[in-house]
Image (tube, coloured by chain):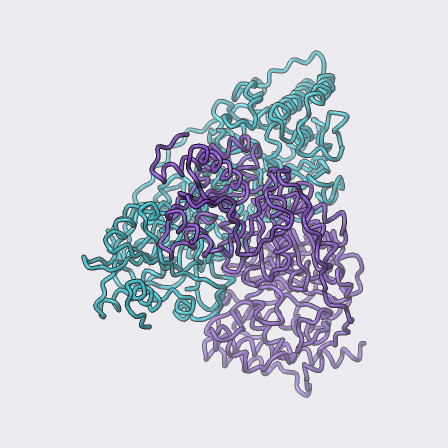
Chain colours: A cyan, B purple
Amino acid sequence: MTSDRASLIPALKNIATQLRIDSARATTQAGSGHPTSCFSMAEITSALFFSEMRFDPKNPRNPDADRFILSKGHAAPILYAAWAAAGAFDRSELLKLRELGSDLEGHPTPRLPFVDVATGSLGQGICAAIGSALNARRIKSDYRTYVLLGDGESAEGSVWEAANVAARDRLDNLCAMTDVNRLGQSQPTMWQHDMGQFERRWQAFGWNAIVIDGHDIAAILDALDKARSTKGQPTMILARTEKGKGVSFTEGKDNWHGKAFKKDELEKAVAELEQQIVPGVVTNPPAMVGKVESTPRPTASPKPIAPPNYKIGDPVATREAFGDALAKLAAADSRIVALDADVKNSTFSDRFEKVAVDRFYENFIAEQVMVGASMGLAARGAIPFPSTFACFLARAADFIRMAAIGHNNVKLVGTHAGVSIGEDGPSQMALEDLAMCRAEPNFTVLYPCDAVSAERLVALAAQANGPAYLRISRPKTPVIYQNDETFTIGGLKVLRESPGDVATVIAAGVTVFEALKACDQLKASGTAIRVIDLYSLAPVDRDGLIAAARATKGRLITVEDHYATGGVGDAVAEAVADGGFTVHRLAVREIPRSGKPEELLDRFGISSAHIVSAVNSLVGAVAAR
Amino acid sequence: MTSDRASLIPALKNIATQLRIDSARATTQAGSGHPTSCFSMAEITSALFFSEMRFDPKNPRNPDADRFILSKGHAAPILYAAWAAAGAFDRSELLKLRELGSDLEGHPTPRLPFVDVATGSLGQGICAAIGSALNARRIKSDYRTYVLLGDGESAEGSVWEAANVAARDRLDNLCAMTDVNRLGQSQPTMWQHDMGQFERRWQAFGWNAIVIDGHDIAAILDALDKARSTKGQPTMILARTEKGKGVSFTEGKDNWHGKAFKKDELEKAVAELEQQIVPGVVTNPPAMVGKVESTPRPTASPKPIAPPNYKIGDPVATREAFGDALAKLAAADSRIVALDADVKNSTFSDRFEKVAVDRFYENFIAEQVMVGASMGLAARGAIPFPSTFACFLARAADFIRMAAIGHNNVKLVGTHAGVSIGEDGPSQMALEDLAMCRAEPNFTVLYPCDAVSAERLVALAAQANGPAYLRISRPKTPVIYQNDETFTIGGLKVLRESPGDVATVIAAGVTVFEALKACDQLKASGTAIRVIDLYSLAPVDRDGLIAAARATKGRLITVEDHYATGGVGDAVAEAVADGGFTVHRLAVREIPRSGKPEELLDRFGISSAHIVSAVNSLVGAVAAR
């Protein structure tokens, strides 16, 4: 090993220098970017890609290949340079960095086959790395996951959520590294080069913490060796580095964050760097890449799941049906995994845990790592269902945003939506979750009202490709659909209709039952209305809604247990706008408070009485409440 | 002291027991709640309220009073019981817990005068406590801030963001406590009663960590003494407790989280508790409350700020104008404070730091604690402007949700909104920030397009009461408003109009300039359009929009550098719906990518060319791009 290393180290050193040169050239050509953030991690990158990792540059998604996640995504140019050096694509492409026509974006996204999750929002990569490491266990592969963080990034709370979960799950197939280059964007980081600050924290959180000089290739290789041989514990390699390393006018200097070199600066920098090339060492980086030993494994062949088995009229909470559906999926498809944040007995995800404990990941009260790990799991072929109270998914809003950017196949489930949770009060009520998920252009958003639709929509979400959100309610609601009823993503159900309908009421979730009650009351007084269950909010059935509008004199009323913005009303309004129709919206329009569910539905304007009143007022009749 | 304590301890013990009884009765009466989570913290509460803290039960908002924030908000009943015992209100009110007519909600909200911030979403109270502690420095008061966390809550990353910031800021006027009762909602916590796990973490993060038996009143008082005398460091008291303490069938028992006692269980529990009352000890809790020594201080009298000083046509980024406005406010109003997350040189909040460094709080890359601390600052009379890239405010979405619930006077500023940031790519582009903030029913949402409007809107936001969001752009845009132009929250500006306008284009921020360009191009081909700068998105000028629609044949086109949902288009659509008008929307409808700003505006459908095309197509002319 020692003699091997004697020849390896100068080669890795030269590759590191070349990666610096490539990063500098690419950012100058782009006119923007973060060359100095690349320079600090050049030796780490070189050691990882050309000595440590086993991967296939031509097939980066090989399921048994080691993973590298660049959590400090702003150092994208060196990531691209490393993959180019490994032979994944031609180095000349590097000069298209940040161009509209190139997938070499300013920060990495999975448009590139060697990127698992989009990074660039700090503190997320380490969460995704946990998902990647958990997936290795799921598929019984010995691939390892590497993730590189910035030091400034370590201030993000999500990093410490990840630290807890990885240690608790004993993820010894996970090796994290921190590029402690001392300088943040606007000033030195909180701990600068005080390596003990990092070491104490990671040790306290249960990690194998190793402090090294991050420009010393032998030290990097030793630390990676130690990480690989450490059992029962994830490793954090804390690498003391210099931002801008290798170029005299940037090394350790302030005010170089996120600045590309000007042309003349580039020439100077490259000249300095080229002088650092160890003479007489010929490198062939692609030949240095460690080979993957692939395990043949059967392709996933999900079995059909048993249909729902409910009785019309029985009161069943959609959250309970969600738990049952998830448990059925566990048996039918080994790719399905579930993640919790200590509410599994309320969301009923514990029903999955009971039947598939090895694919159930408890994150305790830490929603960011729950969603972030899901992103990593999804990137490696699992179909994760992270679930918690819908309001607490807001804790992971930025992860959801990044999951959308990465088109990660994550199935978010938020239970206890809306004021219908009752007494716990507004802090536990999600009233902006639809706004959050509908905003993302590629999210599927589903909202079942009864147990049958809940089971069916959970199964549909599992089958669909890409991010999805299921909005689930707390209260028991009567089963209204037959067990063999079919649902489609982008569909709706017309629950009541007659030729004389004077208006259409569009509801979803708990308000479906308010709409049905209102329909009955109105019918008793001689007014017929159409009632729609808009269980698919993204995509939405534009044609179905416009047809209903046309059939009911253009009168559309939406009613939702959500704030007035971003939910059912907005979804319908945009869908029917081209048809020239407008929408009258009933929604929660103020901060709610504690009370009984039915009291709150009425107090906040979304009960059957409000629907009756809205219909009467819209058809010009005297509102009679 | 020792002899004082000899009589004090049995009194505090009896009060603790009474608080348990009150919590049990209230939750049983309500039919829901978390009595066992109250039981574990009864001694801590008793010691805090009736020995440690100096406050005024009749005037809880006294600026010099010590603060107590219940971060584990689900234990609200014991918080209410303590304030009632202190004399803030009649104890009989406790039995109205969770009723629609009572402000004693399931989780605490600032509807109650003794609650600074809404809690119930875990991990937020400690962030708010930092704001409260910073405010004591701002107003030069020696009040102390106490905050109680749950042990399960300690898994939230925001707790560790707070841990870093409080230690770095040497907040020795902050005393946190953790109620380590071992049991989470669905299972035991990650570390259960392994107190070393907690101690190691808090020490590593730079806190004075003290482990005690949380049911031993003498130990609690000693720890509080130590906290008070510790200089230069915040204290974390780690209290080992039993969930359900004091009642044999709940103490340390599983499956009691969030469950009120049934009537018969209550009787048993109360009987057991009453037996624990130390005989012969007469307590008079209100008389035990420590008095506040109030410092007379002048009421805030903000001075007017100098008007903007720009030249029409000059290119100035709104972010730069924001920084300048904030710096002006610093001098005009001592209540204004600014918070950053290591992007101050990009947001230009560093201009505030330069003139008011003592009111500038650096959080490094930790957006949750930045917003959470702002909530605490606002609750104590400061007017905080936390700012970062708009996309990273999503990191604090759940804090924003809770700020809305608490109606905290926080002025969020998000810069670098939209695809117009260009090359950095989607991870740095906020395209759902308007959806996030507009969803909250009580948020003011403002979006300036030029430097003059930016300065004016920053000042208006400072004056307005309640939460606000300012959306700010990266690129330089030409000044279009005169320095004396006036703006109002809920207003808009008609920038182009003529009697023959065939459509209205409603823009905001960077798209205002695309709309103006489109207007010029259309004019050249003989088509007149109205152009509106919708700088106030919440509230929105319904009448102004409807008037424009009426004047331009009902043709409304919105164009926004935001996803199609939750932003300008939805805001306008709802505003004009009652007038029978629909809206044609131009917005970003797919995940964007890196490129030059102007290329991206065009690629994603929001450039002047797209506006021209939309107008032409709407008026039935041949679209000519």
Q: Position of residue B230 (x, y in %)?
A: 79, 61
User: Is residue B592 among the parts visible in the rendering?
Assistant: no
Is A366 rendered above or below residue B408?
Answer: above
* Quadrant (top left/top right/bottom left/bottom right) for the C terminus of chain A: bottom left
Name the foreground residue: A212 vs B548: B548
Q: Residue furthest bottom?
A: B280
Whether residue A609 is situated above or below residue B22 in the rendered picture: above
Residue lying at 53% horizontally and 18% vertically, measured from the top left: A90
User: Does residue B620 lie above or below B461 as drawn?
Assistant: above
Above or below, B212 relative to A149: below
Query: Can you see residue A346?
Result: yes
Q: Give A560 or A302, whichever is nearer the viewer.
A: A560
State the residue in front, B518 or B120: B518
Q: Residue placed farthest to the top in the image?
A: A280
Residue A269 appears in which quarter of the rendering?
top right
| Residue A251 drawn at (x, y percent) | 75, 29
Residue A547, image x and y in percent?
25, 49
Task: Please state which of residues B602 and A203 is positioned toward the viewer in this rendering.
Answer: B602
Give the quadrant of residue B382.
bottom right
Which residue of the protein is positioned furthest toward the left in this rendering?
A499
The x and y percentages for residue B494 are 51, 48
Q: Is residue A490 left or right of residue B247?
A: left
Position of the N terminus of chain A, as image quadrant, is top right
Q: How many tags in the picture?
A: 0
